[in-house]
Amino acid sequence: MIYFFLILCMTFMGAVASVFFKRASESDGLWKLLLNVNLYVGGFLYVAAAGINIVVLRYLDYSVVLPLSSVTYIWTMVLSYWILRERITKRKVLGVLCIVAGAVCVAF
């Protein structure tokens, strides 16, 4: 059970990292990008999520972990709405539901 909690943490960290990268991408030019703290926070979160992924893969089958990592798409949609003020359309929701349904079918 702890490993499924770690998968949720890993996927959330990956989605949050993407938000930081999105904010870093708004920098004008390479130099400002390299000085943008969002780039490094996002990179740290991605590396930390990869570390959790390695730990989880030690105890669970790859054929279970990889499909469950699609939970990242749910986090991404929620965070993009809350933080980036992006619109969530019916089509996006349907797409995420299809991905998650497929992942559940493969994982269990």
Image (spheres, rainbow, N blue to C red):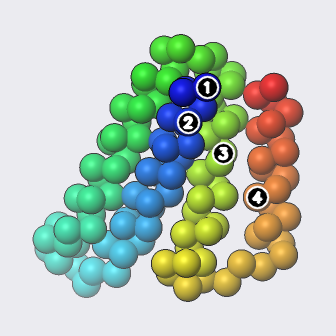
Distance from label 4 to label 3 (Cα)? 9 Å
| Label 3 environment density (alpha carbons within 10 Å; few <14, some 14–19, many ≥20) | many
Identify the residue position indicated by label 2 in the image.
5
User: The C terminus appears in which quarter of the rendering?
Assistant: top right
> Dividing the image into 4 quarters, which one contains the N terminus?
top right
**Amino acid under disc 1:** Met
Q: Quarter-wise, where is residue 39 in the image?
A: bottom left
**What residue is shown with label 4?**
96
Q: Position of residue 6 (x, y in %)?
A: 50, 34
Give the residue pinned by disc 1.
1
Q: Nearer the viewer, residue 57 or 2?
A: 2
Marker disc for residue 65: none
- Camera-near label (3 vs 1) is 1
Rendered residue at 33%/58% (across/down): 42
Residue 30 in view here: no
Labels 2 and 1 touching (C-beta < 8 A): yes
